[in-house]
Amino acid sequence: MIYLVLKDLMLQKRMLSMMFLYIVLFSFTFQSIPDGQFIAILVAVSYMFVMMGCAWEDKNNSDVLWNSLPVSRWQIVGSKYLSILAYVAMVVPVYWFVSTAFTLLRIPVSTAPITWWGIGAAMAVVFLISSFYLPVFFALGYTKSRYWNFLLFFGTFSFGSLIPKVLPEPPSWLQNLQNAPMEIFWACFSGVVVLIVAISFFVSLLLYGRREF
Amino acid sequence: MKPILELRGVSKKFPEFSLDEVSFSLEPGYIMGFIGANGAGKSTTIKLIMNLLHLDGGEIKVFGLDSRQDELEIKQRVGFVYDENHFYEELTIKEMTMVVAPFYKNWDQQCYQSFVHRFELPEKKKIKTFSRGMKMKYSLAVALAHDAELLIMDEPTSGLDPIVRSELLEILSEVIQDERKSVLFSSHITSDLDRIADYITLIHNGQILFSEPKDQLLENYILIKGGHDLLDGRLQPYLVGMRENQFGFEGLVTNKEQVQAVVGGKAILETPTLEDIMLFCTRGKVV
């Protein structure tokens, strides 16, 4: 499976210059949310790489290749989830490079510092969005799933901030959780993310198993 | 001898096409030409063998193993060359091989390199810069580098120039020399198979019309050309297919001795090519 992730990275390395450009662009765009700027950039760029990774598969009709090789379908599906980790890991150093360059060149753009908390939170959000996208991708392929992808991506950034205003008063157990120590909050949050990712993986596997090429 | 590939009653239904009870088998050490017109069901059959499509009925055994239950074990021992390139066009073959090779337990890097040199494939150029022939050769190098016992080739020569086609056919002849390997070679370019195939399987409208040794096929069928006066009904029992024009007729018949007795010296009898056999068997009588 690691070689499938390696393939995703080799394909994406050609997009490295685009990554720089996106980070510069998003640094300007997300200046208005200094607390969430790092997370937002990490999520936006990493998820764009998830999308591009799926687009490469479609462009090369590579399902035929992988399903003709001694590779199981769970490896093909699993590698797309595993690649998310690799994408986030790729974006972080590029973000550091861009933010350092802004400082050294005295470009008047404020950039948020890199934190472990931010990396973890961004990773969770990318996994969550991907968990809603990948089952549709594995069921229908990239071309047919791109509208759903578009909705998810732009929906997350356009309406994400509106959710707290639209939702009713949270139940008391959730309020208690919000007031709980950070460790407990994070443990619960991570548990929920892992559960959603696991469900998404098994749904993807089920749907991909039914696909014909 | 145990067949290396065996299809029994294989069926697959699509809204506008169906594969109906397809059965044939291939023994080790032979090349089977899988012929038929475009849309006859060749690629569907190959996709079913490779488990790229789900079976609606029947059974496929490769190396005596079930193609569904033992899929990964089978694919370790199968090489494939498709009519289209499915490798990532943005990668070089060096990168592509780095990703593909680890999946094969029997990958032989030295063997792979020897084919890369023999085929003069530039390792550092992106696959998208390759010609169709080079892409096919790369597929073949990958297929041969893991010591595949069964090569499955779906229209590998379509769109290739005669030199590359000839080169491919030479390699395939070499491949089966050890009598352990077999090739299933689907094509509608029957002249390629005239040269190398040991067995011919003809598929038409999703049904197998015959699956026989090529030599036997060429002995069984005779191409006949003659005037309209010969079409008095006596040839009817032997005619497989026929076409008429203003000067006479041309047809495919079986049973050479009896046909000779019927026509005497009034007709030309020739050994047909595979193309003649395919055309007359699938088109029947065309006036």
Image: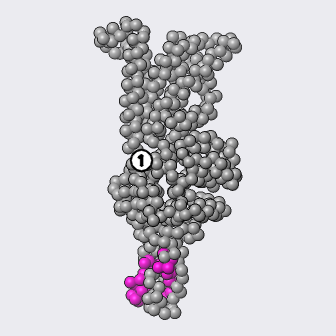
In what quadrant of the picture does the N terminus of chain B appear? Answer: bottom left
Q: Is residue A182 magenta?
A: no
Residue B98 percent across, percent down from the top left:
60, 40
Q: Callout 1: few (<14), some (14-19), or many (20+) C-alpha neighbours within 10 Å?
A: some
Magenta range is B217-244
Q: In the figure, residue B161 lies in which quadrant?
A: bottom right
Q: Name the one closer to the observer, A169 or B254.
A: B254
Tell me the kind of residue under disc 1. Glu
Left or right of residue A65: residue A13: right
Colouring of the image: one colour
Left or right of B257 on screen, residue B81: right
**Left or right of A86 on screen, residue A197:** left
Any part of residue B145 in sight: yes
Q: Nearer the viewer, residue A130 or B66?
A: B66
The image quadrant that residue B6 belongs to is bottom left
Q: Nearer the viewer, residue A195 or A49?
A: A195
Extreme residue toward the front, this view? B1
In the image, residue B201 sits, relative to residue A97, either above or below, namely: below
Q: Position of residue A187 (x, y in %)?
A: 40, 15
Q: Is residue A131 left or right of residue A48?
A: left
Q: Residue at x 39, y 87 (%)?
A: B233
Q: Is residue B241 magenta?
A: yes
The residue closer to the viewer here, A6 or A160, is: A6
Helix, strand or loop under label 1 = loop
Q: Residue at x 46, y 74 (%)?
A: B280
Question: Residue at the spot x=52%, y=23% of the render?
Answer: A44
Would you say residue A32 is visible in this rendering? no
Residue that mark 1 sits on: A212
- Report the number of numbered marks: 1
Output the chain of dot 1.
A
Looking at the figure, which quarter contains the C terminus of chain B? bottom left
What's the residue at 30%, 11% (across, down)?
A173
